[in-house]
Amino acid sequence: MPKPSQQKETVARVMHEFKHGELASSTGRKVTNPKQAIAIGLHEAGASRDETPRKNAENRRKTKDREAQGAIARARDESRGADSKADLYAEARRRNVPGRSHMSKAELRRAVQG
């Protein structure tokens, strides 16, 4: 069984994702129930009482592997607006931002957000 501090970190990360609307269930739908978010966090942390110790260890290892590969960080960055320049340009065109064709990606991001 992992250390309680490691479990707390994983549950805290999952709850952070839930709070910011980034947490999705296994079907891909957005999680809106805080109890479901807690259950997902405990499952990922390998601390679920509903599973065998072996299955909990496997869940914990899978979560740590995903974190180590950066899959979670990449998903978080994508949800924070790490859009491509083409996406930002399309949004600027939709908002009719003047001078958009001469802007860099950072300038487009500021124009679209501001």
Image (cartoon, rainbow, N blue to C red):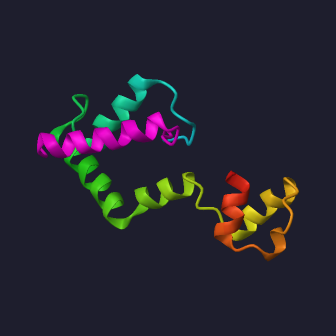
As drawn, is 23 to the left or to the right of 62?
right
Indicate the position of residue 40 as horizontal and vertical percent values: 37, 36
Indicate the position of residue 109 as horizontal and vertical percent values: 67, 61
As drawn, is 11 to the left or to the right of 97?
left
- In this view, 87 is above or below 54: below
As drawn, is 94 to the left or to the right of 85?
right
What residue sits 27% from the left and 56% below the top? 64
Residue 56 quadrant: top left
What residue sits 80% from the left and 76% below the top? 102
What residue sits 18% from the left and 46% below the top? 6
What residue sits 55% from the left and 57% below the top? 78
Please say whether residue 105 is visible from this viewpoint: yes
> Please, what is the dominant secondary structure of the magenta stretch?
helix
The magenta span reads 1-25
Reply yes or no: does residue 49 show up in magenta: no
Quadrant holding the N terminus: top left
Indicate the position of residue 110 as horizontal and vertical percent values: 67, 59
Residue 27 quadrant: top right
Please say whether residue 46 is visible from this viewpoint: no
Reply yes or no: does residue 7 show up in magenta: yes
